[in-house]
Amino acid sequence: MRPSENCGDPRVRTWKIMVLPSLGQPDVPLEDQWELFTTLCHILHEQKRFEELERMTFSALGSKEFMRDKERAREMEFMCLLACIYNDSSYFAYNIMRELVIKNPESNRCWNLLNLIISKADDLT
């Protein structure tokens, strides 16, 4: 696979050039997969492509490799939450945040975020 000539973001072209040599190996290292995922999420966020960002983060939640590491799993949940908030998906944001409040009932930040999501959902209706 070669870098696309019509690819708008030079970081995407650079990433393809950097990663392709290691993709010939049987397994792509988990750190490379994580770096590719987070880079893609940052690019989608910068370009305000929130629907695709939401889809990408929810898809990554299904990755057994990413979810084995507790710190990465927490980061994935938070990235999904942010993607839902940016994409005005209050239903999904509420469900994610409700679960986080159940896990962390003493956290004022979690309660404040839940309140923000509920308020935002009320504004949309």
Image (cartoon, grey):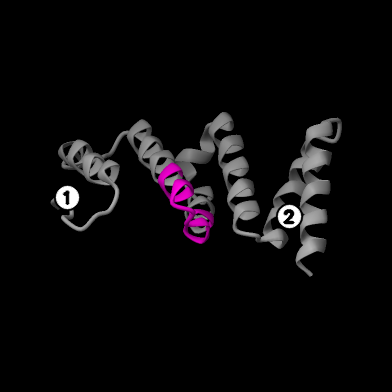
**Magenta residues, start to end:** 42-54
Q: Is residue 123 above or below residue 20?
A: below
Q: Secondary structure at mark 2?
A: helix
- What residue is rendered at 17% in x and 50% in y? 3
| Residue placed most toward the observer, 63 or 39 | 39
Report which residue position mark 2 lands on: 95
Question: Residue at the bottom extreme?
Answer: 125
Residue 12, percent from left and from top: 28, 46
Residue 117, percent from left and from top: 76, 52
Circle 1 residues within 10 Å: few <14, some 14–19, many ≥20: some
Q: Main secondary structure of the magenta part?
A: helix
Report which residue position mark 1 lands on: 3
Tell me: 40 left or right of 11: right
| Snapshot quadrant of residue 73 | top right
| Snapshot quadrant of residue 36 | top left
Residue 51, percent from left and from top: 52, 61
Q: Amino acid at mark 2?
A: Asn
Q: Is residue 116 above or below residue 50?
A: above
- What residue is rendered at 85% in x and 35% in y? 105
On whether residue 47 falls in the magenta region, the answer is: yes
**Mark earlier in primary sequence (1, 2):** 1
Tell me: 32 left or right of 94: left
Circle 2 residues within 10 Å: few <14, some 14–19, many ≥20: few
Tell me: 111 left or right of 77: right
Q: Secondary structure at mark 1?
A: loop
